[in-house]
Amino acid sequence: MKIAQVSPLWESVPPKMYGGTERVVSYITEELVRQGHDVTLFASGDSLTKAKLEAPCNQALRLNTGIFSREAPLISMVEQVFSVADQFDVIHSHLDFLAFSLARRSPVPVVTTLHGRLDLPELAPVFREFSELPLVSISNSQRSPLPWCNWLATVYHGLPSDLYSAHPEPGQYLAFLGRIAPEKCPDHAIELAKRVGIPLRIAAKVDQADRAYFERVVEPLLDHPLIEFVGEVTDVQKNDFIGNALAMVCPYDWPEPFGLVLIEALACGTPVLGYRRGSIPEIIEHGMTGLISENLDEMTKHVEGISLIDRRRCRQVFEERFTVEQMVRNYVQAYQQILSGPQVFPGKRNTIAEGMSAEWL
Amino acid sequence: MKIAQVSPLWESVPPKMYGGTERVVSYITEELVRQGHDVTLFASGDSLTKAKLEAPCNQALRLNTGIFSREAPLISMVEQVFSVADQFDVIHSHLDFLAFSLARRSPVPVVTTLHGRLDLPELAPVFREFSELPLVSISNSQRSPLPWCNWLATVYHGLPSDLYSAHPEPGQYLAFLGRIAPEKCPDHAIELAKRVGIPLRIAAKVDQADRAYFERVVEPLLDHPLIEFVGEVTDVQKNDFIGNALAMVCPYDWPEPFGLVLIEALACGTPVLGYRRGSIPEIIEHGMTGLISENLDEMTKHVEGISLIDRRRCRQVFEERFTVEQMVRNYVQAYQQILSGPQVFPGKRNTIAEGMSAEWL
C-alpha cells in the first residue's frame, strides 16, 4: 500500500526528547516499512526513518526556540501533502483537525488519528462540521464527548516488543513516571507513598509551563525520607526504573486519552495503580494487570493487593494487546476497511474531473 | 458588490476592549454597507454590524477564558465561508495565512490583508507556497521581508473622521499610548521626558504576557514627578488625552507593520515623535506631521522642534490619507482590480465544473 504518514512538526520523528505523538508516528511508520509498504513520512527534517522523508522544515519546532508562529509550517506541510495526494492509496494524518478542510477535498481517503483529549467544548463545532471524515480514536473513552463522529476504529498505541523486558520479581518501591502537571496528580502519588510507608521514586520532567505548579505544590512535598525525585530518565534507564518497581502509580485526574506510561509498565511486567479516568480502565484490567480506584483512599487500600497481581501476566497482556505489530495490524485493517468500504469521499470527484483540469488552468 | 469580510474570532467586531484587527474589520465592513455593498461579516456572535453576521461561535475567544484550542473555531469558520464562496464576488480574509489552502481552491477571488509583522523566518515558506494569492499590506515597509508575494496594494488603515477632533493648541505634556511591551519601549519615552523636563502621561494596558516586563522594567521608572501612569483609556477619553498633548511619543523598536496610534495622533492634530522603524516614516512625514529619529539621543534633540509642527496640517493629512472613507475606497479599488485583472484563480475551474457536481456526489 502507498501510505503517507503526516506528523506534527513540534518534535522530530522519533522525538529527541519527549513527544508521545511523534514517538507513535515513528513506530507506525517503521513497522509499515518493515511490512513492505511504500511509506512517505511528512515530518521535520531532523527525523530519522526508513520511509521516504518529506520535510517542510529542517528542524523540529520545539527545539527551534525562535519560532513564534507554529501554524505556518503546518499549513505549508498540509498543502504539500495534498498537492501529491494522488500518489498515495491512503493519507494518515496525526494533525488533529488541522488538515480537515483538505481531507474533505482529497481524491484519496484520509484517516485521522486523534491523539489528544476531545472533551473541550470548543472542539465540538469543528468535528461536527467535518463529521463525515473517518477518525481513529486511541481509546474508546476518548470518543465519548463526540460519539456522532465517523469513528473507523479504536487503535491502541503499541511499543516495540524488545524496548522493555519482563521483570518477574516485584521491587520494593512505587514508581511515578511522566510530566509533572496538576492533572497527573504527583501529589497523590506522594501522599499514597507516605500513607503506606513504601518508597516512591518520581522520574519526571518539569515543563516550563508547569514550573510554577511544581515549585508551589510538588517541591515542598519532596523533602521526606520515602520520596526520591530522580528527574528525567532515558528509555534504557526506564526499563529498570519501571521494571524494578512494585507498581506504577497513575493517579491521573483527567480524561487520559491513552497513557503510554500504562503500557510501558505492562511491558516491564509492572502492574498499575490507577484512577478510573479516561482510558485507564480500558487498558488496565482490574485484578489482572493492576488495580483501579475511584480516589486516593481507595488506592491506599489497594496497595497491599498489588503483590497478588501476576507480573508475567502483565507482560503477556502487553504482548497480546500493546505491541507495535498489533497496533500496525489494526491500522492496516482500518486503511483496508476505508479503501474497500462504502465510505463517501466528497473529494473523489476531483479524480473524475482530472482529465479536464489541464484545460482549465 | 457582494463581499465577505472574514474576521479573526479573538475579539468581537468591533472589539469590546483592545483589538486593532477587529476594529479595522469593523470600519471596513460598516463603510462598505454604507456605500451600498452587500456585505456578510464572518465574526464572533457578540459582534455588532449592519452587515449580515455569520457567527461560527457565540462569543469572542479572548473573553471565553475556557478556550484551549484557538484554531478549532477558525477552521470551522473558514470551511463555512468557502462552502458558500459562490455567493460572493470577493472574499476578504483577515486571517493571515490560515485560509490560504481554501483561498487557492476558491471559485471566487480571495483578498487577504496581512495585519501583523512578516519578518519572522518561519513565515516565508507558507507565503512562498501560496505566492500566487493576492495580498494587501498595511504599509510598504511590512512587505519588505516577502517582496516576491503577489502584492495587490498597500492600504493604510483609516479611522472615522468624527472619532477624534482637531486640537489646534499644543498641550504641555508628552503622551505615550498603547500596550506596555518591550518592543514599544515605554522606558525610552520615560527617559525622554526626564531628559527634556516635560511631563509624560502614559495611557496603557498591561497584558498578562507583559506583566513581568512591566513590573521589572517600567514600574520602577514611574516614581518620578514628571511621569504619570493613567492606565487604560476609552475612545472618548483618548480624544483629549491625545489632543491635549504636545506630541505623541512612539519610540517603537520593532518593525511596526502600521501603528494605529500614529493616525490617532494625527486625527487629534498631535504630531508624532517616532523612531525610523517599520511603517513609521511612511505614515509620519518628517518635519510635516512629526519628527523621525534613529534613537533616543536624536529624539531628545527633536523635542524642541516639535512645537514648530503645524497641528492643523496634522489633522489635514489625517483627513487626506487616513480616514475610513479613504481606506475603503482603496479596498474597493483592490477588489475591482482583482475582479477585472489578469489574475489566475486556480480554483476557478470549480465553477466551470459546477453543473456536473450534482452527479458526482
Image (cartoon, coloured by chain):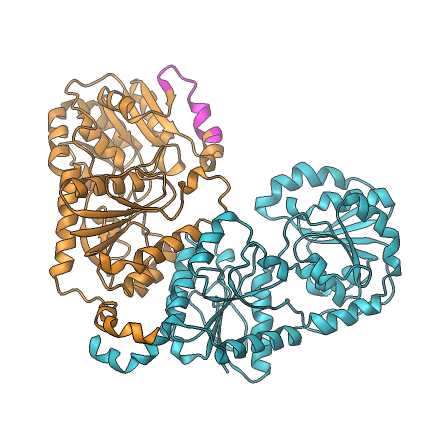
Chain colours: A orange, B cyan
Q: For this view, does B89 lie left or right of residue B299?
A: left
- In this view, the residue farthest toward the bottom is B36
Up the image or down, B182 lies above or below B95; here it is above
Q: Where is residue A43 in the image (x, y as percent from the top left)?
A: 33, 45
Closer to us: A186 or A337: A337
Closer to us: A169 or B25: B25
Closer to us: B172 or A147: B172
- In this view, the residue farthest toward the top is A225
Q: Give the range drawn in magenta.
A: A215-228
Closer to us: B302 or A198: B302
Up the image or down, A135 lies above or below B152; here it is above
Is residue B181 something that shows in the picture?
no
Give the residue drawn at x 61%, y 39%: B212
Q: How many marks?
A: 0
Up the image or down, A81 lies above or below B348; here it is above
Q: Position of residue A106 (x, y in %)?
A: 27, 63
Confirm whether the magenta stretch covers residue A127.
no
Quadrant containing the C terminus of chain A is: bottom left
Q: Where is residue B197 in the image (x, y as percent from the top left)?
A: 87, 45
- In this view, the residue farthest toward the front is A359
Give the residue drawn at x 48%, y 52%: B123
Q: Position of residue B312 (x, y in %)?
A: 83, 69
Q: For this view, does A204 lie left or right of residue B39?
A: left
Give the residue drawn at x 29%, y 79%: B353
Confirm whether the magenta stretch covers residue A216.
yes
Is residue B231 something that shows in the picture?
yes
